[in-house]
Image (tube, rainbow, N blue to C red):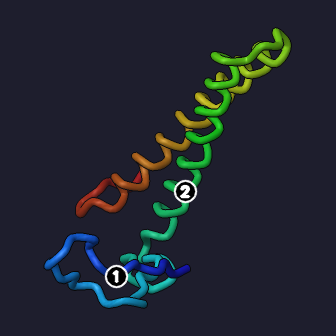
Amino acid sequence: MSVEIASGSGLPGRSDPIRAGATVENEASSGTIPPGAEALVELHGEREAVERRLVLAQQRRQFGTDADDVAQAGHDEREALLELDRVLTRIRAAEYRRQPGARRW
């Protein structure tokens, strides 16, 4: 995936070091991620998805008008919190394993 970068800083008299039409590639697709870090990147992607679900559930619970929907949102929020805890634990374990001299159980 590449992202188009707009040229110009928007300030008169200021030059932008980035030329028009330049692109920045996603680290995963450009191969700049260190070997063995793909799993960690995937875990962080999973974390982002769970955090989005959690925020949506919290908003539905807080601002919902239907009692059944508010109750379901509370249930969804609890499930998302449990899943977020599991994902964060896996991230911590993956980060620890990447440290030099990390113990292997």
1 vs 2, front mark: 1
Q: Residue furthest top?
A: 67
For residue 7, the mark is 1
Horizontally, residue 88 falls left or right of residue 15, namely right
- Residue 47: give x, y in percent of width and height: 54, 47
Q: Which residue is more in the foreground, 76 or 21?
A: 21
**Amino acid tagged 1:** Ser
Crowding near the residue tagged with mark 2, few <14, some 14–19, many ≥20 C-alpha atoms within 10 Å: few
Query: Residue at coordinates 70% horizontally, 24% vertically from top-left?
Result: 60
Residue appearing at x 47%, y 80% in the figure: 4
- The outermost residue toward the front is 12
Q: Image height check: is 19 above or below 50?
A: below
Q: Secondary structure at mark 1?
A: loop
Instruction: Measure the alpha-carbon separation of dots 1 and 2.
Output: 29 Å
Q: Considering the image in quadrants, where does the N terminus appear?
A: bottom right
Q: Residue at image x 50%, y 47%?
A: 90
Q: Please, what is the three-letter code of the amino acid marked with disc 2?
A: Gly
Estimate the x, y position of residue 37 in percent, counting from the top left. 43, 69
Residue 98 in picture, x, y percent from top left: 33, 62
Using residue 32 as the reference point, say whether residue 8 is left or right of it.
left
Identify whether 67 is placed above or below 82: above
Residue in the picture at 67% in, 18% down = 63
Residue 52, image x and y in percent?
Answer: 60, 41
User: Circle 2 is placed at which residue position?
Assistant: 45
| Crowdedness near tag 1: few (<14), some (14–19) or many (≥20) residues, C-alpha within 10 Å | some
Question: Closest to the observer: 54 or 20?
Answer: 20
Quarter location, residue 83 = top right
**From what the image shows, is residue 55 above or below residue 96?**
above
For mark 2, give the secondary structure: helix
| Lateral position of residue 70 relative to residue 83, left or right | right
